[in-house]
Image: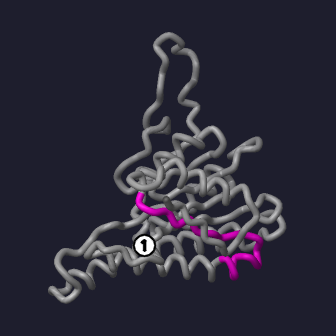
């Protein structure tokens, strides 16, 4: 169980750039259930610990990050993630839907079925998976705790992209961009419906990181939304 003032964060895509940054920067403030498919964040967890050879008795590995491997396109894995989070911490205060599929199809939309296959893969990971995880968490925990949710300022942050609202001159991005546009729209509807049980829902839409904006600034935007009161809003992180 989580104790004290530490908030419980369920973070997907924890092994990627943003997930790793969030775990590294904010493990001191959050108990983090870090959901990964393959890569894990480079922080102390139940799988690895840090020991200072000059102070071997100091428990640097009193880890606040607990890693769970899961394929979020598998409905059973999604349910397992929610079960583990609630069993370990007793609650979830912040859900960060950060896991994403990012790939470009080659050539053009009309060359075979590559663009169609690409779109399906993007929608499964970038739209359906975050909705399923949010809904399962609401069904199992949030939906019956409206007053508690409001008092605890519980919320969801969906990680989108400026690609969802801007057509960039890079061929092959239609599937990714369409999925992020769908996630933006989904966030608004989630905010409207989840408000009935006191859970806020917002979206962070960064430009390409770390090439154009810093990964740190994207993580900061997530935390700022968690600490705030907005719902149904989009925070753009751009140059």
Look at mark 1 in the image and give the residue it sits on.
163
Q: Residue at x 52, y 40 (%)?
A: 24
Residue 98: where, in percent of width, then height? 49, 61
Q: Is residue 134 above or below residue 92?
A: below
Q: Residue at x 34, y 78 (%)?
A: 175
Task: Please say whether residue 123 is visible from this viewpoint.
Answer: no
Name the residue at the bottom extreme: 110
Could you say which is closer to the camera, residue 217 or residue 93?
217
Residue 213: where, in percent of width, then height? 46, 54
Which color scheme does this rendered protein use? one colour
Could you say which is closer to the camera, residue 209 or residue 63?
209
Task: Please say whether residue 18 is visible from this viewpoint.
Answer: yes
Q: Residue at x 57, y 23 (%)?
A: 59
Q: Residue at x 65, y 74 (%)?
A: 139
Residue 127: where, in percent of width, then height? 47, 76
Res. 109 image quadrant: bottom left
Q: Is residue 62 above or below residue 137?
A: above
Name the residue at the top extreme: 54
**Is 166 positioned to the left or the right of 217 in the image?**
left
Q: How many marks?
A: 1
How many neighbours does mark 1 have within 10 angstroms: few (below 14), some (14-19), or many (20 or more)?
many
Task: Say what secondary structure mark 1 lies in.
Answer: helix
Could you say which is closer to the camera, residue 194 or residue 171?
171
**Is 234 positioned to the left or the right of 168 in the image?**
right
Q: Is residue 91 magenta?
A: no
Res. 55 image quadrant: top right
Residue 5: where, in percent of width, then height? 76, 44
Could you say which is closer to the camera, residue 187 or residue 146?
187
**Is 61 positioned to the left or the right of 168 in the image?**
right
Q: Is residue 201 magenta?
A: yes
Residue stretch in magenta:
191-208
């Amino acid at each position: 169980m989580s104790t004290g003032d530490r908030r419980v964060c369920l973070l997907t895509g924890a092994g990627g750039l943003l997930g790793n940054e969030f775990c590294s920067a904010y493990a001191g403030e959050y108990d983090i259930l870090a959901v990964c498919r393959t890569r894990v964040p480079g922080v102390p967890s139940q799988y690895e610990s840090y020991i200072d050879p000059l102070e071997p008795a100091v428990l640097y590995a009193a880890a606040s990050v607990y890693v769970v491997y899961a394929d979020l396109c598998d409905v059973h894995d999604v349910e397992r993630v929610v079960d583990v989070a609630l069993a370990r911490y007793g609650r979830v205060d912040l859900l960060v839907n950060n896991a994403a599929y990012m790939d470009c199809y080659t050539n053009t939309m009309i060359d075979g079925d590559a663009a169609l296959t690409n779109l399906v893969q993007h929608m499964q990971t970038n739209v359906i998976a975050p909705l399923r995880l949010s809904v399962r968490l609401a069904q199992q925990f949030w939906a019956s705790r409206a007053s508690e949710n409001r008092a605890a300022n519980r919320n969801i942050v969906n990680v989108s992209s400026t690609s969802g609202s801007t057509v960039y001159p890079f061929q092959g991005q239609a599937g990714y961009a369409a999925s992020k546009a769908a996630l933006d729209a989904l966030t608004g509807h989630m905010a409207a419906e989840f408000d009935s049980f006191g859970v806020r829902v917002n979206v962070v839409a960064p430009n390409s990181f770390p090439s154009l904006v810093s990964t740190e600034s994207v993580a900061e935007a997530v935390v700022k939304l968690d600490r705030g009161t907005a719902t149904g809003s989009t925070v753009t992180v751009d140059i």
